[in-house]
Each structure stands twice: as structure tokens, then as C-alpha cells.
Image (cartoon, rainbow, N blue to C red):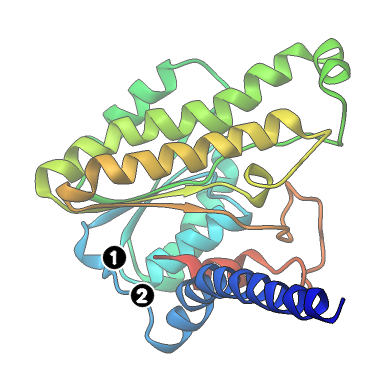
């Protein structure tokens, strides 16, 4: 009995050691890359050298606006793309006045047809775009079962795929070729922790974010040798209009707090 107990303790110790090692191997690099590294040594990527312009979708509030401000702070000219022209003009003036950079706007609805991408391509032709931030996205107004959501508003399911998936692939298709030609560029895709953890009652939203993660990972593998950096950002709760969290907290930071640490990479 004593021998069995001693053996069990040895095996338990070995198992705990293996689990602890695996946790440290995964967690410590993540802590350095996402928390300590950016704070201690800053980003290893000079975004201003990627190109003169940055393009940001969903840029009139929340995370998109925070990215726009941070990129302008680094001296990049901006193309802001969102649905509301009035909001775009307001944000463009605010950022342009504060940081002294040129800001252009394009008002399109990303739940519309593919013709919007022809317009974006035309209005950005000739710009040296070095950074693309695919931020635009929509979510449920409230958690709901898939069939209830579909029966109530089938158009919503089409819209969420258009805004969360088609926007990422089509915007990337517009600007990636220019980056490949000059062998440098950054694509930042806004995903979510919803794409990697169970999310019943938000099944379509979380699935679109899982797509963004997979697309980003494989795109990085395809184009890393061409000097392209692709990043999938997976925030948790953030105090934005979409999350309906009004007051920032430790568990739901403001967009400004999050983007400052994630601008790259």
C-alpha cells in the first residue's frame, strides 16, 4: 500500500510538472508579446515606413476610431471608411486638426453589395497604403437561438456575414497586391475572443470571428516571405457602442486603452 501511494505521488508530481510546463510555455510568451513587450520595448514594427497611408474600416467610433488616432499619431495619412458621412467628417476633422495629417473619408455600407468595393478601389487608387485595419463589424442586438434569429430576421444573417467576413476578404484583396509589390505592409484584422471560446446564442457572430482568425493565420503563412505582416486581434469585452458597455473597467477597457497596446504586433 505504501509503495502504491509513493508511486502515485511520483506520477502525480510528474503530471503536475508537465501541465505546469505546458502552461508556462504558452502563457509566458503571450504575456511578453501582448503586455510586457509593448510596454517595455514598444512595437518592433515601424508603421510609418510601411507606406504613407493607413486605411481603417468602421472608423467613426470605438476600436476603429482608436486605431485611427494611434496611426495618425505615428504620422500616417488616413482613409476612414464607415457608413455615416456626417460622423466621418466629424472624426476626420477632429483627427486632422489634432495630429496635422491628411484624412480622407469614404461613406459605404458594408452590408451592401460588392459594388462598394469598386468605389473604394477607385477612391484609393494611387495611394501608397502601408497599413490596413479591417475593423468594421456587426453583432447581435441580443443573444438569441440561431433558428429564432433566422426566422425573425433572415436578412441579418446575410448582413453579418457581409460586414464581418466579406469586408475582410475584399478589403484585403484591394490593398494586399500593392503591399506585395513593394514587399512591405501590415494587415490588422479585428477578431474577438468570441471566435475561440464557446459562444452559444451568438453562434453566427462567433463563427465569423473564427473565420477572421483562420484567414489571418493562413494569409500570414502565404505572404510572410513577401514582407507582409498579418495580425488577428482578439479583444474580449471593450466599452464600445457595439458591446453596449458604456463605462470602461478592468474587465472591459476603453478602445483607447486596448488599441495603444495592440497597434502592432
Checking the image for residue 34, the label placed there is none
Outermost residue toward the bottom? 40
Residue for badge 1: 47
Q: Is residue 249 above or below residue 122?
A: below
Label tally? 2
What percent of the width, then of the height, locates residue 130?
25, 53
Report the front residue among 206 and 137.
206
On the image, numbered disc 2 is attached to which residue?
43
Residue sitting farthest toward the left: 182
Horizontally, residue 155 falls left or right of residue 163, namely: right
Left or right of 223: which side holds 15? right
C-alpha span from label 1 to label 2: 9 Å
Q: Are marks 1 and 2 in contact (CB under 8 Å)?
A: yes
Q: Residue at x 54, y 28 (%)?
A: 110
Residue located 45% across and 35% down the image: 168
The image quadrant where one finds the N terminus is: bottom right
Q: Is residue 126 visible?
A: no
Residue 128 place in picture, x, y as percent: 19, 48
Mark 1 vs mark 2: in front: 2
x and y, in percent, of residue 107 in the image = 49, 34
* Label 1 crowd (10 A; few <14 / some 14-19 / many >=20): many
Which residue is pictured at 86% across the width and 36% down the height? 142
Residue at image x 29%, y 44%? 221
Amino acid at each position: 500500500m505504501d509503495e502504491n501511494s509513493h508511486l502515485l505521488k511520483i506520477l502525480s508530481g510528474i503530471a503536475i510538472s508537465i501541465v505546469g510546463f505546458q502552461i508556462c510555455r504558452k502563457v509566458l510568451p503571450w504575456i511578453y508579446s501582448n503586455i510586457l513587450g509593448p510596454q517595455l520595448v514598444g512595437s518592433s514594427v515601424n508603421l510609418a515606413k510601411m507606406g504613407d497611408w493607413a486605411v481603417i474600416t468602421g472608423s467613426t467610433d470605438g476600436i476603429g476610431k482608436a486605431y485611427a488616432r494611434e496611426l495618425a499619431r505615428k504620422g500616417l495619412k488616413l482613409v476612414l471608411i464607415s457608413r455615416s458621412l456626417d460622423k466621418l467628417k466629424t472624426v476626420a476633422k477632429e483627427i486632422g486638426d489634432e495630429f496635422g495629417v491628411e484624412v480622407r473619408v469614404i461613406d459605404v455600407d458594408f452590408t451592401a453589395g460588392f459594388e462598394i468595393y469598386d468605389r473604394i478601389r477607385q477612391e484609393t487608387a494611387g495611394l501608397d497604403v502601408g497599413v490596413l485595419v479591417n475593423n468594421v463589424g456587426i453583432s447581435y442586438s441580443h443573444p438569441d437561438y440561431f433558428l429564432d434569429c433566422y426566422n425573425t430576421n433572415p436578412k441579418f444573417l446575410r448582413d453579418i456575414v457581409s460586414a464581418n467576413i466579406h469586408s475582410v476578404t475584399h478589403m484585403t484583396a484591394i490593398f494586399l497586391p500593392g503591399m506585395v509589390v513593394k514587399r512591405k505592409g501590415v494587415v490588422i484584422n479585428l477578431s474577438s475572443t468570441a471566435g475561440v471560446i464557446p459562444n452559444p446564442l451568438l453562434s453566427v457572430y462567433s463563427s465569423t470571428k473564427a473565420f477572421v482568425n483562420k484567414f489571418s493565420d493562413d494569409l500570414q503563412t502565404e505572404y510572410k516571405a513577401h514582407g507582409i505582416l498579418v495580425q488577428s486581434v482578439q479583444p474580449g469585452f471593450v466599452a464600445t457602442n457595439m458591446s453596449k458597455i458604456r463605462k470602461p473597467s478592468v474587465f472591459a477597457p476603453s478602445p483607447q486603452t486596448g488599441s495603444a497596446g495592440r497597434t502592432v504586433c
